[in-house]
């Protein structure tokens, strides 16, 4: 944990509203590692090693504030020790920093830039959506089922009218995720749906746009299983559906790769002589 948080020191202005709060956290973090009282000069060296320039006088003022907050306690002329309230504060802020770091990593990882990375997103969706389908069959109430049917019909209408069904299809999956009632799965999938839509909207030719009718039929089968509260069947059908989408994208990747090879073969060879 220490290494991960220290790697984010330069970004701490994002987490703390002032530089003083950042320094306060770093001081308390160090005191948490030490059972013996620590003086201002030692704390200055610690901050210097972290490339945080601050005078001993400023450190002294900050420590008086932490005394007043009940985070630290002065032990004679020996220095300060952290209190139980201080330990709770450091743990709370450390958890917040780590949570923000992990969220950033997730968002960064979920930003596909090409079809190969889109495949990675789809594989992640497959793992998560098998579970949301099962949970939806177990948990969905009347309102959730009504919303699911509404988005299914919207997707089917797009197919009938020969409109691009991509957005409607993702909205259906998002609605299904919400029906699961699992906020962690919903949040993770929301990121994946957003990034998938961002990439797909930039691709002129995408095979999945042409498979809307088949996908809509698979969606209807999933909804029927959920409405019958058949968790096993809902999970099985979602697994099959996501694999079909993955196979379709793989097909497009292979097709584009073959076209590239054929184009290279048509280049006239260089004749020397």
Image: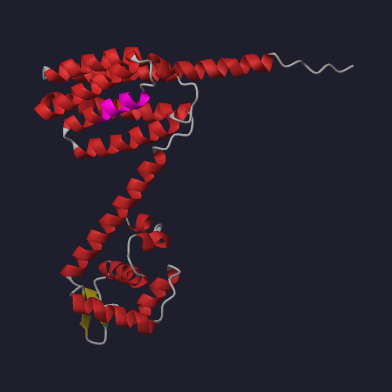
Q: Locate residue 60, reporting x and y percent.
A: 32, 82
Q: Is residue 139 visible?
A: no
Q: Total label count?
A: 0
Q: Quadrant of residue 187?
A: top left
Position above or below: 155 against 24: above
Position above or below: 215 against 23: above
Which residue is at 32% across, 28% downward?
A: 125
Q: Which residues are magenta?
A: 166-174
Which residue is at 20% across, 39% downward?
A: 183
Q: Main secondary structure of the magenta part?
A: helix
Which residue is at 19% across, 19% downward?
A: 223
Left or right: 175 with respect to 207? left
Position above or below: 38 against 1: below
Q: Quadrant of residue 178?
A: top left
Position above or below: 63 against 229: below
Q: Is residue 249 magenta?
A: no
Which residue is at 39% across, 37% downward?
A: 110
Q: Is residue 45 visible?
A: yes
Q: Locate residue 182, reporting x and y percent.
A: 18, 36
- Which residue is more in the foreground, 82 or 270? 270
Q: Locate residue 47, reporting x and y percent.
A: 40, 72
Q: Is residue 168 magenta?
A: yes
């Amino acid at each position: 944990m220490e290494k991960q948080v220290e790697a984010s020191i330069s970004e701490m202005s994002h987490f703390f509203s002032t530089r003083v709060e950042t320094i306060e956290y770093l001081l308390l973090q160090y005191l948490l590692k030490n059972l013996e009282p620590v003086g201002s000069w030692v704390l200055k060296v610690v901050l210097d090693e972290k490339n945080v320039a601050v005078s001993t006088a400023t450190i002294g003022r900050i420590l008086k504030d932490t005394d007043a907050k009940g985070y630290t306690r002065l032990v004679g002329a020996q220095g300060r020790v952290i209190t139980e309230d201080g330990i709770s504060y450091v743990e709370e802020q450390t958890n917040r920093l780590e949570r923000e770091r992990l969220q950033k990593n997730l968002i960064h990882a979920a930003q596909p830039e090409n079809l190969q990375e889109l495949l990675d997103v789809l594989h992640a969706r497959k793992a998560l959506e098998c579970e949301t389908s099962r949970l939806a069959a177990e948990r969905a109430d009347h309102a959730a089922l009504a919303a699911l049917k509404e988005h299914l019909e919207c997707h089917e209408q797009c197919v009938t009218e020969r409109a691009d069904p991509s957005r409607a299809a993702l909205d259906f999956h998002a609605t299904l995720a919400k029906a699961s009632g699992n906020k962690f799965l919903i949040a993770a999938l929301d990121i994946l749906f957003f990034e998938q839509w961002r990439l797909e909207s930039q691709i002129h030719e995408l095979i999945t746009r042409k498979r809307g009718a088949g996908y809509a039929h698979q969606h209807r089968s999933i909804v029927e299983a959920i409405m019958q509260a058949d968790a096993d069947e809902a999970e099985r059908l979602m697994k099959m559906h996501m694999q079909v989408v993955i196979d379709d994208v793989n097909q497009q990747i292979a097709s584009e790769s073959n076209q590239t090879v054929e184009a290279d073969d048509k280049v006239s060879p260089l004749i020397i002589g």
